[in-house]
Image: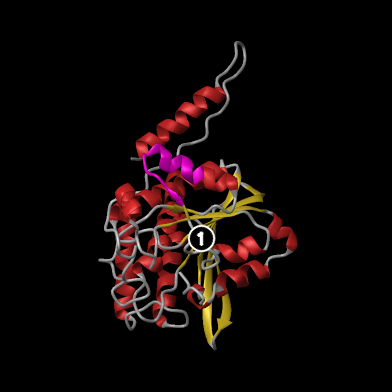
Amino acid sequence: MKLSIPGRASATAVVAAAALLTGGSTAGAAPAPVAAAAPDIPVANVKAHLTQLQSIATANGGNRAHGRTGYKASLDYVKAKLDAAGFTTTVQQFTSGGRTGYNLIADWPGGDTGQVVMAGSHLDSVTAGPGINDNGSGSAAVLETALAVARSNYQPTKHLRFAWWGAEELGMVGSRYYVNSLTTANRSKISGYLNFDMIGSPNPGYFVYDDDPAIEKTFKTYFTGIGVSTEIETEGDGRSDHAPFKNAGIPVGGLFSGADYIKTSAQAAKWGGTAGKAFDACYHSSCDTSSNINDTALNRHADALAYAVWDLSA
């Protein structure tokens, strides 16, 4: 995330119950189709991607920052996974600060291309460290959700597109470049953009963006189903890759587990963890390594990500 400026089964049961209430047939009528349920996203798979991103950073000067070899190696890793899974991938190149940057866009074949659901995250770190929570966590969860789409051969009504952004840490440069490169017609085809920036914070909170009501409700439904309370996300307003989409009039939403704000006593009582301590004390530091991840938060957020992708694209 850019610097500021001065219980899954229960959720499935909630959806199933709603389907029974709203989709039941009357005598002589065919039952309404029930949308495919989102799969569980194995947290071990997400963490395996984080291990790879940590190894890439270690081999490339300790970071995965814009214009550095670690960033390009990170992009190549993600792209190879997507290509092997059957996605159509596009690498978009731009320049910032005299260095070349890259976005990676992955389209899943099929679905109505006039109604595009996007899920994205920034792939770059700051130069100070490997950026495993910020934002390896979001990047790895988006990647594993995309791979789950391929494993299940999911065929949604809407078209699915996944994205990994470059140079977010310099001011959402990559995502802004992408949005600005779209024609007005193509912008209007994006029915929603979902952003995931820091979702494995070691002293986590559960924050939901309140930008688009329908997207916000989808995430809250998931967390209610697993018995986890949420709060409205305020720390990252305008500081991550949803901002260029929102500014272009595209509906946005997303999840966040907290950065350098301090967890209150009320939040610790609700979520556990340590009051009086930052959600991520290693934010933008060299200690943002693969040890700087809360597995429970990462697991819950990854499952919520998949739930929203399936629900909003059905």
Residue kind at label 1, given as amino acid type: Gly
In the picture of the structure, the residue carrying the numbered disc 1 is: 120
Callout 1: few (<14), some (14-19), or many (20+) C-alpha neighbours within 10 Å? Answer: many
The N terminus - image quarter? bottom left
In the structure shown, which secondary structural element does the residue marked by tag 1 occupy? strand
Which range of residues does the magenta coloring cover?
218-231
In the depicted structure, whether residue 48 falls above or below residue 68: above
| Residue 246 picture location, percent across and down | 62, 60
Residue 111 place in picture, x, y as percent? 61, 46
Task: Judge whether residue 229 is colored magenta.
Answer: yes
Give the image location of residue 58, x and y in percent.
29, 78
From the viewer's perspective, is residue 113 above or below residue 50? above
Query: Residue, x 40% and y 72% (percent of image)?
Result: 74
Q: Nearer the viewer, residue 231 or 212?
A: 231
Residue for point 67% across, 63% down: 248
Residue 42: percent from the left, percent from the top? 33, 49
Residue visible at 54% across and 88% down? 98
Q: Nearer the viewer, residue 285 or 55?
A: 285
Q: Is residue 227 above or below residue 258?
A: above
Residue at x 50%, y 23% (from the top left corner)? 20
Given residues 255 and 263, the one toward you in this image is 263
Residue reaching furthest to the front: 265
Q: Left or right: where does residue 114 sit relative to residue 36?
A: right
Q: Residue furthest top?
A: 27
Which colour style is shown?
secondary structure
The answer, for residue 33, to whether it is visible in the render is yes
Is residue 38 something one can see in this rendering? no
Does 207 appear above or below 23?
below
Q: Is residue 182 left or right of residue 102?
A: right
